[in-house]
Image (tube, rainbow, N blue to C red):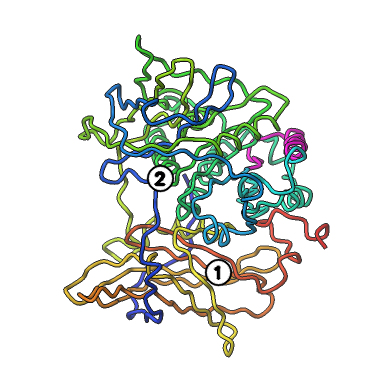
Amino acid sequence: MDISGRAVQAQTTPTAAQQTAPNPSAQQGAYTLRVNSRLVVLDVVVTDQQGHIVNNLTKDDFKVYEDKIPQTIRSFEQTRPKPPSEILPIHSTAELDRLEPNAPVSIIVLDEITTKFMDEAFTRYSLKKYLATQGDTLLQPTMLVAVNLEHFMVLRDYTTSKAEILNAVAHHLQENPWKSEGGSFKDEQYDAAFSSLIEVAQATAGHPGHKNILWIGKGIPAIDPTTLIPDAAESLKAMIAQCTNMLRDSRVTLYTIDPAGVPTEDPPQDEDGFITEDPFGGDVDFNELAMTTGGKAFFGRNDIDAGIDAGVQAGNNFYTLSYAPTGDASDTKVFRNIQVRLKDPSLTATTRSGYYGITAPVVPAADAKGRSSDRFLFDLTVAADSLMVYDGVPFTIVRDAAQADSFSIHIEPKYVDWEAGDSEKLTAEVALLAESFDRKGKSLKHVAKVLTAESPAQSSSGSQPAGLTLHITIPTQSPAARLRFVVRMNRSGKLGADNFFLVDKKNLNDPSTGLNPTSRK
C-alpha cells in the first residue's frame, strides 16, 4: 500500500495546559468492542429456513465454538428495532454520540472504484427505490458515503431523515467513466477499498453501537496471492489481517451488494460441518471479507433495494454475546475460526467467521531518531483528507474571538490517554494537525505538532485528571474555505477529526464533498 505522507515532523513541545475542570459524569468509560483480556464479542443474526429473522431466543438456545472447541457464553442480550415513535431525530455524528450512543447504524457506500459507470447509475436508482419504501424517519441513523480512486466522500453525515439522504443522492457528482471503466488500476483499487474500510473502522471507533456497512458495487477484483512477489503477498496478508481485526474491534459488519457479481464459494468444512481453514488462504475476495465480518454477499440480482433492506434489517435485529476463548493462545498469527450453532437445527446463526490472533502494537509517532513513523503519517493523512467525523477522540473547536487564526481544541477527560509517569504526575502524548483548504479542495497550509501534556495523578479524595485544551494557529484568510482538525492519542492510536467551515458548505466545489454546489443552491 503506497500512501504518500505529509512532511509531519514529530516533536516534543512544552507541556500543554489543562484548562478544563473535571467532569464527574464524564469519568465513566464508554463500552468498546475489543478482544481485551481474551474476550470476544459477537453480534449474531438468526434466520429461519425461509430467511426470516428470528427474535426472542435465549442464551440457552446458542452454542459457540472457536476452532471446534465449545466456549462458555459470558454475556447475552438482544437488540430489536425501536418503534417509529421512539426514534430520536439524528442529524450528525455529534448528535448520534450524545443522544443515541449505543444505537445500531448503517453506512451506505456507493462504490465508484471498480463499478462501471452504467452500474453506478443503476445503484443510485436502486437506493432511491429502497428509500421510497421507508417512512420519513429511517429505522436507524444512516450515513451516505461515496468512494472512488481519489476520494472518500461523506455525502451525508448520520441522519434519520429520508429526505436528507435523498437530497444527497440527487446532488452527488457521479464518478467519471474513464476512471470507473479502466482495468489497469488494480493496485490503486485495492488501496482505495481497504483504506476506505480502515477509515470507517477508525472513524467510528468511538461509537460503541453496531455498524453495518452496505457496500454497493464491485468492491475489489479477486486476486491470487501466489501470483504476487513474496513481499507483496506478505503485505497483502498483513493488510487483510489488520482490516479484519479493525472491523471487529469497531463492531462493523460488511454487506456487499453487486448486481454484476458472481457467487463466492463457501470455505471447505470437515465432516462435522466446521470450517477449519483461513478464509483468505486462497484467493483474496471482497465478498469473502464480508462473510468473515458476519455479513453477506448479494450478487447477480437486479433487486439491489432488497439487498439494502436485508442488510438494514439484520443491523436492527441481532443478539450480542461474548466469551473468553479457552483454546491455545500461543499462536498469534493463525486465523481463529468461530461458529455459532443453535439448539433448533432448522435455524441459522450468522456472525463473523473468526479473527486473527495477532494484536498489532500501537505504532509510536516517531522512531528512535525522531522521524515520523509510517503508521503515524498514514493515520494523519487519511483523517485529514476526509470530511468524515472521527469520534474515537471527540473534541470541540473554539475560534478565538480576538485572533481569527487561533483555535482551541478541547478534549474531555475520559478521552485522554493518561499514563502514570511518577507518583505525582500523569502524562499524555497527543498529535494535533490543522489543515486549510480552498473552495475547490486544494490544500493550502498544514500545521502539525506532538504535545506532551501533564496532569496531577488521581488523589486520595477521588479527583480525576482534567481534560485537555490544545491551541493551534493556522491562516484563515481567503482563499481558505474550510479547516480540518485531527487529534491522535499516541499511546492508544485513537483518532479524532472534525471540520470547521469558514464559508457556507453549500458553496464549496470540493471533491471531498462529492456534491455539486450549483444544484444545491
Does residue 125 show up? yes
Looking at the rendered image, the disc whose residue lies closer to the viewer, 2 or 1, is: 2
In the image, residue 110 lies in the stretch drawn in magenta: yes
Q: Amino acid at mark 1?
A: Glu
- Considering every residue shown, the one lying at the far top of the view is 271
Q: Residue at x 51, y 42 (%)?
A: 194
For the C terminus, give its image quadrant.
bottom right
Residue 98 x/y as whole percent: 53, 61
Does residue 177 show up? no
Q: Which residue is mark 2?
A: 249
In the picture, residue 81 is in which quadrant? top right
Segment tinted magenta in the rendering = 109-130
Q: Look at the picture and state if 155 lies above or below 19.
A: above
Give SS at disc 2. helix
In the picture, residue 237 is in which quadrant? top left
Q: How many marks?
A: 2
Q: Mark 2 packing: few (<14 Cα in 10 Å), some, or many (20+)?
A: many
Judging depth in this view, the residue of 109 and 173 nearest the camera is 109
Magenta segment, prevailing SS (helix, strand or loop): helix
C-alpha distance separating marks 2 and 1: 29 Å
Q: Earlier in the sequence, mark 2 or mark 1?
A: 2
Q: Which residue is mark 1?
A: 435
Residue 181 x/y as whole percent: 70, 35
In the image, residue 104 lies in the stretch drawn in magenta: no
Q: Is residue 71 left or right of residue 265?
A: left
Q: Amino acid at mark 2?
A: Asp
Residue 290 x/y as whole percent: 51, 32
Q: Residue at x 40, y 22 (%)?
A: 341
Q: Look at the picture and state if 235 lies above or below 475.
A: above
